[in-house]
Amino acid sequence: MPQATSARAGWGVLIAALLVAPWLFYPLFLVKVLCYALFACAFNLLLGTCGLMSFGHAAFFGSAAYIAGHAAKEWGLPFEAALLCAVAGTSLIGVVFGYISIRRQGIYFAMITLALAQLIYFLALQLPFTHAEDGLTGIPRGKVLGLFPLDHNMVLYYTTATIFLGAFSLIHIVMNSTFGQVVRAVRDNETRAISLGFEVNRFKLLAFTLSAAIAGLAGANKAIAFKLATLVDVHWTTSGNVVLMTLLGGLGTLFGPVAGAIIFVALENYLADSGLPVQLVIGAIFIGCILLFRRGVVGEIENLFNGWCDAAKKF
Amino acid sequence: MAEPAALEIDDLHGFYGESHVLHGLSLAVAKGEAVAIIGRNGAGKTTAMRAIMGLLERRSGSIKVKGRETISSPPEMIARLGVGFVPEERGIYSSLDVTENLLLPPKFADGGASLDEIYRLFPNLSERRKSQGTRLSGGEQQMLAIARVLRTGANIFLLDEPTEGLAPVIIEQICDVIDGMKKKGHTVILVEQNFHVASRLADRHYVMEHGRIVDVITCNELAAKHDRIKSLLGI
Amino acid sequence: MNIQVILGQLLVGLINGSFYAMMSLGLAIIFGLLGIANIAQGAFYMMGAFFSWMLLRWFDIGYFPALILVPLVVGIIGMVIEKLVLRRIYRLDHMYGLLLTFGILMFIQGLFVWLFATAGRPYPVPAELRGGFDLGFMFLPKYRAWVVAASLAFCLATWLIIEKTPLGRTLRAATENPALTRAFGVNVPALMTFGFGIGVAPAGAAGLLAAPIYSVSPLMGGDLVIVVFAVVVVGGMGSVLGSIVTSLSLGLLEGLARVVYPQGANMVIFVIMIAVLLVRPAGLFGREQ
């Protein structure tokens, strides 16, 4: 099967699944999956385009949760406006953090993002509006388009699914656009890209900010959906979780983060209910993944698929 | 019972990643012999040395050092059999001073030179004992690279391009040192682009091309095969 | 603002700086020799504190024997982890090293949370080190003076071993050119296992030193190691001496910040990191990799 057809099949499956899912699974569970899936997609955008692995993406996810929550609860802003505030705020943080961290790559970049996110964590701990350990609770869901009450779970689900699909499509378009190609060229051979005249840092900064903004969108969506923004959302374990999700699903693949998010959220729910130690199991899976399953679910499927294609070509 | 050859290579294939660099190399060096591996750039001479030393990731075939099969051995095991390695890039440590560079390779057998003997043999190094390794001139670094392995008690020496880029006076000094090794009965395997050096020091010359031996020329045959050598080396 | 308050906070800063120094020293050794950014250093710190507590609670073994036992046990655990787990990813991209140690941190922290819950457990200051000295301008608690002195002595001893002994010489050579060092007959893989143990032992020792000051909890290492990473970014991963100097300086600055603006003290080191990055991306003592 040529690549274009398999991609279109993937999209078809995705849209069909999104439409049908709430009739098969608990809608709030799906909403959680979609929020984290978008979060993972945002993380993966930065990785796939610039080859930069951020260990501090919880900074954007969590800040947006607090901003959206505050906007909806204290300022009484409608749903869309609260999301917009959060995305705007997170983009600003993204530009600043991006500007600082883009100077380094690889491990140093990861360490810097980790430290910057910790800064946000400490800010969240101190600032009054976050209510520290108690968290920001009782965030109102409001209405979407001023008409449909989000307290109705199906409305919430389809709204979240639409937001997800929109942002996911945006990511896909960006990755395949001229911008996406340039940034990938930068990733593969930065010296050459510079010698060709590209303003390498500007492209990287743009990718970083976009990644932050989309992570923010996911966080804001999550906060309003679950009426809650807590310190956990800005903690380094959340940054680690999004890395694991993407790794599980397949680093750098298009659908990988989605698959990873499904597995992760389902697993976390199961563990929490069964009383097993969550962080211990997740740590073990993390280690197992890196040693034995680096390609992730989607990556392994793609690899198998390529193997079949190569075998088929030999006939 | 005849003593095993110092080095015996049979059908050695070597790869850098996907690149097939050595195509069935075979040679044998008896104890106490001095041989040279000569050939054009890119023939695979340095790769062969690295393969013998266990530094080449993928190799197949047979390499026997003093009768022991070492094709799958790690470098540290091969060194312990008594092989002293002087790499093409010299490999002087910048984070160590001259004395530390000299003391780094562990002693595995008696018979090596003592530190004092080395300083007598190489007065330049004696003067620069506390200098950072890489602050030395090219010639001094080459001396240091050779001096290092004289301490360890090794009796098979692999020298990769020891005279490359050096002034004639220094080349003379290095040739004297290698002569000293030969007098002690050590085995010397030399990779040399400089044919004058090779012909002065080696009993036999292996000509390498495209990752395999294409000719063997003994000392006696040098004059007779002079033209052939010139064309093989592209001089 | 009286002088006693300032000196008191500077002392706390010096103590924190000593912990940063011990942790970052180990990180520098591990990174140089193995090429791995060991974020699990936080887990070894926590295990050091916990093992001290266990030795006291379960085996009645006190502080001073623990000073020897704890780093030893932590070092051995480190070597086992290197041999079984870390070794498998050396041939991969450096990022996998950080990912793997991140997973190990989560695993070990999760294990201890499961076994011991998150509440902090107290560890008593040993009797010999209780009380303090009245210096006139301030009161210097014995234990805190001991912590600073012990950490500095430890760091100095490590520096001496690396710069002045044959083992240190071999470690430096293996860090610079592992392949050639093997060609000289040094068993570099074994050295790397040993090196990882040497790198995590100071973290364990720091945990023991910290136990009487900060109570013993499974979560104590996570936040600390991130600060230490920021310290390492500021100092650069180049030199052992650089890590020590940077750690102590940043600890002191943090202490000073606590005098002037206590709520912001946690964040000072990160802010300094940002400033240094804007001016010298390679860090103060770093060599561009």
Image (cartoon, coloured by chain):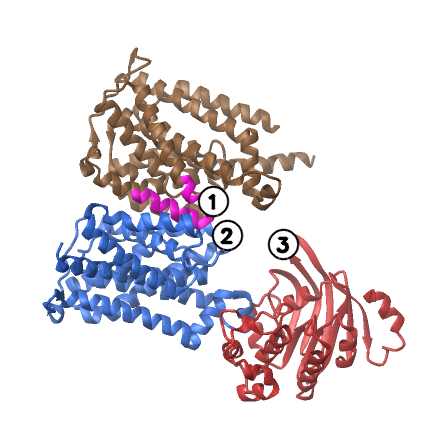
Chain colours: A brown, B red, C blue
- Mark yes or no: residue C106 visible: no
Q: Which kind of residue does numbered mark 2 sit on?
A: Leu
Numbered mark located on residue A134 in the image? none
Which numbered circle lies on residue B17? 3
Task: Using residue C64 as the reference point, say whether residue B116 is left or right of it.
Answer: right
For disc 2, the chain is C
The segment highlighted magenta reads A98-119
Q: Do the residues indicated by labels 1 and 2 lie within the same chain of the protein?
A: no
Q: Residue at x 23, y 20 (%)?
A: A76
User: Which residue lies under the disc numbered 1?
Assistant: A294
Image marks 1 and 3: residues in contact by CB distance under 8 Å: no
Magenta stretch mostly in which secondary structure? helix
Name the one closer to the observer, B114 or C106: B114
Q: Residue C37: where, in percent of width, then height?
A: 41, 55
Question: What amino acid does circle 1 point to?
Answer: Arg
Whether A91 is drawn above or below C256: the answer is: above
The answer to which image quadrant residue A303 occupies is top right
Residue B31 within the magenta-colored segment of the rendering: no
Residue A297 or residue B172, whichever sits in front: B172
Q: Position of residue C124 (x, y in %)?
A: 13, 62
Q: Nearer the viewer, residue B96 or B210?
A: B96
**Circle nearer the viewer, 1 or 2:** 2
